[in-house]
Image (spheres, rainbow, N blue to C red):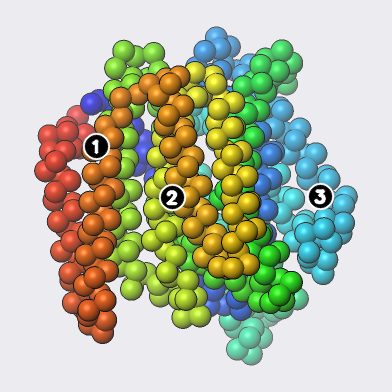
């Protein structure tokens, strides 16, 4: 229980930066969707889809390799120096490539008139990749609070410059308030690129805050150690790359598949609707991210304990309970949360339940994935992710022309479900963990039943929002009450103060 309490505490601290902090960042969604036409928000979503691909490539699984070898290698500084130096090389090379071939890259991705997009993202990606190992070092040393402060500052900086450039300068400029400050801060030719400029400035601030970790670097490069780390991390990179295909490639495919029939503007608008509505499922995604930050070093630290597998199984119970609560929260209060988006986006609300449950499957998969990381059989993670990526591409190409972005939602659902099932059976063969499938299944099934009751109630009372929210709140409290009583003493032990 003390181990679980430590994990819960670190998840909470990481959550301050990755959940609470990004919830504030999430508030930028209405700023973008209300400030820019759908086509422009579609451009933002598409460019960040490219970011997700390249950040995996630039870090090439070295964070996980750093955790692995730092826990076994006697000379931890040598592991840090070797990992950091290798990532510095890829980051600098990427930035130089982006600056040298700006227009060619812009032409290739379909933004020939906006080569500045390429420049901004070459710098953002290079800096963020550069920061990855220093940030991993903070996690490895259990410096969760410092990690949280840096990430919160990064997010706060992003929000500040977005508000400055868009909410203040853009709004005043378009309303005719051309003061010296407004004209200095806003140029309509830059337009939606101010979103990227804000991100770049925040990345620079993050790099400056990591100065104490950066100067720890010693040019102690062990080529033999690097080879071992790359062999370990390469399958993780492939798995991560394939995972990004599962998570973001649908945005790129929606545009490419719908553009021939509907035109560029229509295709970007469909990307915007899908991306905007996907934000409503982000609560579970953010929790998964915070959990992964805390869980990866936690799982490695407890790998040699006799009761390690029992701890992993119990962690799964609480994880599924937490995401089930989030699933219900979003759907029960969707009639309020939908106002984060303009009414022109509401046609996409029908895919929110699909995306929420898909992300639950993804979270369970990430929870299970510790088996191949602990055993060193990372190739299985790559195989599972590649299989999911191939299925993602195939189903999207097949179904998007028929169902539009709804096809991408269902594809996400079935791909993550398949990855979860595959990982479970492979894990039970190579590193069996006694997961309580009945309890996990009950939490998910019970949440679905309560959502079904809510949907039936709403279908009969469509006009009375107060009655709908009251009924949903009663269901929400019932689920919480039932779960607390089911876990009872265990939850009290976790929450009990030391």
In the depicted structure, whether residue 282 falls above or below residue 10: below
What numbered label is drawn on residue 418?
none
Can residue 213 be seen by looking at this rendering?
A: no
Is label 1 or label 3 in front?
Answer: 1
Left or right: 146, with 161 as reference point: left
Q: Real-space Cα distance between discs 1 and 2?
A: 20 Å
What numbered label is drawn on residue 438?
1
Dividing the image into 4 quarters, which one contains the C terminus? top left
Q: Which secondary structure, mark 1?
A: helix
Residue 495 location, quadrant = top left
Q: Which secondary structure, mark 2?
A: helix
Dot 2 corresponds to which residue?
A: 359
Q: Residues within 10 Å of mark 1 (few under 14, many from 20)?
A: few
Q: Residue lying farthest top?
A: 74
Left or right: 84, with 475 as reference point: right
Q: Which secondary structure, mark 3?
A: helix
Toward the viewer: 284 or 166?
284
Q: Earlier in the sequence, mark 1 or mark 3?
A: 3
In the depicted structure, whether residue 292 falls above or below residue 259: above
Residue 381 x, y percent position in the rendering: 55, 31
Left or right: 41, with 23 as reference point: right
In the depicted structure, whether residue 110 falls above or below residue 390: below
Q: Earlier in the sequence, mark 1 or mark 2?
A: 2
What numbered label is drawn on residue 98?
3
Toward the viewer: 442 or 323?
442
Residue 271 x, y percent position in the rendering: 60, 67
Q: Real-space Cα distance between discs 1 and 3?
A: 51 Å
Q: Residue at x 71, y 18 (%)?
A: 227
Q: Earlier in the sequence, mark 3 or mark 2?
A: 3
């Amino acid at each position: 229980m003390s181990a679980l309490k430590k994990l819960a505490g670190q998840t909470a601290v990481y959550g301050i930066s990755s959940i609470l902090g990004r919830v504030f960042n999430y508030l930028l969604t209405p700023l973008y969707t209300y400030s820019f036409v759908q086509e422009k928000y579609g451009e933002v979503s598409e460019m960040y889809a490219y970011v997700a691909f390249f950040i995996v490539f630039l870090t090439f699984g070295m964070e996980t390799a750093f955790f692995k070898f730092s826990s076994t290698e006697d000379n931890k500084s040598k592991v840090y120096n070797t990992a950091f130096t290798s990532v510095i090389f890829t980051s600098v090379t990427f930035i130089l490539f982006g600056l040298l071939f700006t227009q060619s890259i812009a032409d290739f991705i379909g933004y020939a008139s906006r080569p500045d997009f390429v420049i901004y993202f070459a710098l953002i990606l290079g800096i963020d990749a550069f920061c990855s190992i220093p940030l991993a070092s903070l996690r490895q040393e259990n410096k969760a609070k410092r990690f949280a402060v840096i990430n919160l500052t990064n997010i706060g900086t992003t929000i500040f410059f977005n508000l400055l450039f868009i909410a203040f300068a853009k709004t005043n400029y378009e309303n005719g308030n051309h003061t010296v400050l407004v004209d200095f801060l806003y140029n309509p030719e830059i337009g939606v690129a101010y979103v990227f400029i804000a991100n770049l400035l925040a990345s620079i601030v993050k790099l400056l805050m990591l100065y104490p970790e950066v100067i720890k670097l010693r040019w102690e490069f062990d080529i033999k150690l690097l080879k071992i780390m790359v062999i370990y991390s390469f399958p993780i990179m492939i798995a991560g790359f394939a995972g990004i295909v599962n998570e973001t490639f649908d945005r790129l495919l929606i545009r490419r598949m719908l553009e021939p029939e509907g035109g560029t503007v229509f295709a970007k608008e469909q990307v915007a609707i899908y991306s905007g509505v996907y934000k409503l499922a982000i609560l579970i995604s953010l929790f998964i991210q915070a959990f992964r930050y805390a869980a990866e070093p936690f799982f490695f630290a407890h790998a040699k304990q006799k009761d390690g597998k029992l701890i992993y199984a119990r962690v799964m119970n609480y994880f599924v309970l937490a995401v089930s609560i989030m699933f219900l929260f979003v759907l029960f209060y969707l009639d309020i949360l939908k106002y984060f988006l303009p009414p022109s986006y509401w046609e996409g609300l029908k895919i929110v339940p699909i995306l929420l449950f898909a992300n639950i499957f993804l979270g369970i998969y990430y929870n299970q994935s510790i088996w191949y990381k602990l055993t060193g059989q990372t190739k299985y993670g790559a195989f599972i992710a590649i299989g999911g990526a191939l299925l993602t591409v195939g189903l999207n190409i097949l179904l998007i022309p028929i169902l539009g972005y709804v096809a991408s939602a269902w594809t996400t659902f079935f791909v993550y479900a398949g990855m979860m099932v595959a990982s479970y059976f492979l894990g039970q063969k190579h590193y069996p963990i006694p997961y309580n499938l009945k309890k996990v299944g009950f939490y998910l099934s019970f949440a679905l039943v309560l959502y079904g009751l809510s949907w039936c109630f709403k279908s009969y009372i469509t006009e009375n929002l107060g009655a709908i929210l009251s009924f949903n709140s009663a269901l929400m409290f019932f689920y919480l009450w039932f779960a607390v009583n089911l876990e009872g003493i265990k939850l009290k032990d976790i929450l009990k103060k030391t």
